[in-house]
């Protein structure tokens, strides 16, 4: 089981959007269309309830249903990594329900409590990992102050912690963290998507997350193939193709991160552009910029 789970993380780890209908409810038909589009394109790892899926804007019931729908659409063709988080009881309960639904791994969102010690970070993730020993556990690390020794300690306690989604925008910090934690012990996933995939790859990552993949799965998969085959010039050519889109997502501390992805999907006719607060649909000028980028991809 562990080899299969590690392989699922050493890939393009897609973070599907959660489409909404005109009345603000989750549009399950459109959600299934997004998931099928990914799987049909060759994506083999799906993470419902990631940040691009608007995890913090969904109700508990909506989050549970997102996992169920992803498992149903993935079938035998893709592995589902369910996003969980909030306080420990909620995260544990969600992880257990994800296991029942058929997810193979859970990605644990970084705790949002303003006061977090390294030991407390270990305790939080250990509580989730111990509750679902049959699932792979993937901590989501966004804190540059967290030391690799904390992850090493978690790994000693919990053999089912198989990978890490690392999302600190500094390749040197990542390289040090991975080596302090145990480079070979975990699968390292570049958690800042395509823009950071090449630099993190050079430091030990073997997979990367992607929200762009919702709109242009072929580009994301081609970038992965180029990195795997050592065709770094080709990888950077693809990097240049996605840079304008990813920069739009990253502007103003990623204020429009999800809105840009959903705008691209609206341009392509896949789903509506609607998002939930604290996100907001793009103004007309930024919508035009997204449309110009998408047209340039010639999808």
Image (cartoon, rainbow, N blue to C red):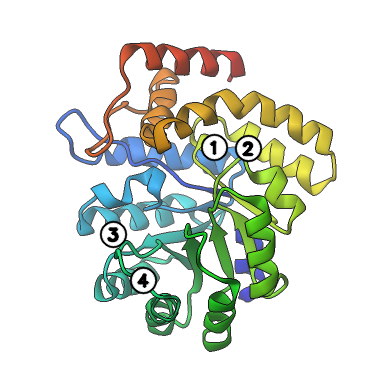
Q: Which numbered mark, 4 or 1, is in the foreground of this view?
A: 4
Query: Which of the 4 image quadrants contains residue 287?
Result: top left
x and y, in percent, of residue 116 in the image: 36, 71
**Which mark identifies residue 222?**
none
N-term mark: 4 or 2: 4
Q: CA distance from mark 3 to mark 4?
A: 27 Å
Q: Secondary structure at mark 2?
A: helix
Can residue 281 be seen by looking at this rendering?
Answer: yes
Label 1 packing within 10 angstroms: few (<14), some (14-19), many (20+): many
Left/right placement of residue 208 relative to residue 23 reads right
Mark 3 and mark 4 residues within 8 Å of each other at the beta carbon: no
Q: Is 98 located above or below residue 192 in the figure?
A: below
For image coordinates 72% across by 72% down, the residue present is: 184
Q: Is 236 located above or below residue 227 in the figure?
A: above
Q: Which numbered mark, 3 or 4, is in the foreground of this view?
A: 4
N-term mark: 4 or 1: 4
Can residue 11 be seen by looking at this rendering?
Answer: no
Task: Locate the N terminus by quadrant.
Answer: bottom right
């Amino acid at each position: 089981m562990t080899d299969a789970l590690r392989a699922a993380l050493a890939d393009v780890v897609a973070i599907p959007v959660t489409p909404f209908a005109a009345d603000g409810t989750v549009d399950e038909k459109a959600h299934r269309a997004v998931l099928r589009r990914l799987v049909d394109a060759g994506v083999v790892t799906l993470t419902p309830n990631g940040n691009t899926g608007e995890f913090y804007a969904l109700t508990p019931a909506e989050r549970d249903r997102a996992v169920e729908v992803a498992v149903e659409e993935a079938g035998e063709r893709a592995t589902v990594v369910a996003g969980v988080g909030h306080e420990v009881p909620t995260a544990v309960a969600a992880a257990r329900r994800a296991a029942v639904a058929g997810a193979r791994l859970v990605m644990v969102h970084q705790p949002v409590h303003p006061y977090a010690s390294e030991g407390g970070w270990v305790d939080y993730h250990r509580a989730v990992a111990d509750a679902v020993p049959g699932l792979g556990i993937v901590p989501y690390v966004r804190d540059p102050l967290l030391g690799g020794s904390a992850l090493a300690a978690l790994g000693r306690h919990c053999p089912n912690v198989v990978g890490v989604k690392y999302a600190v925008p500094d390749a040197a910090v990542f390289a040090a963290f991975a080596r302090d934690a145990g480079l070979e012990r975990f699968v390292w996933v570049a958690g800042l998507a395509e823009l950071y995939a090449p630099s993190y790859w050079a430091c030990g990552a073997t997979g990367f997350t992607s929200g762009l993949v919702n709109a242009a799965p072929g580009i994301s998969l081609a970038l992965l193939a180029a990195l795997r085959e050592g065709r770094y010039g080709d990888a950077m050519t693809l990097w240049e193709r996605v840079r304008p889109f990813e920069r739009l997502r990253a502007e103003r501390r990623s204020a429009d991160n999800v809105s840009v992805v959903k705008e691209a999907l609206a341009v392509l006719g896949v789903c509506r552009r609607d998002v939930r607060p604290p996100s907001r649909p793009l103004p007309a000028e930024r919508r035009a910029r997204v449309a110009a980028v998408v047209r340039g991809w010639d999808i």
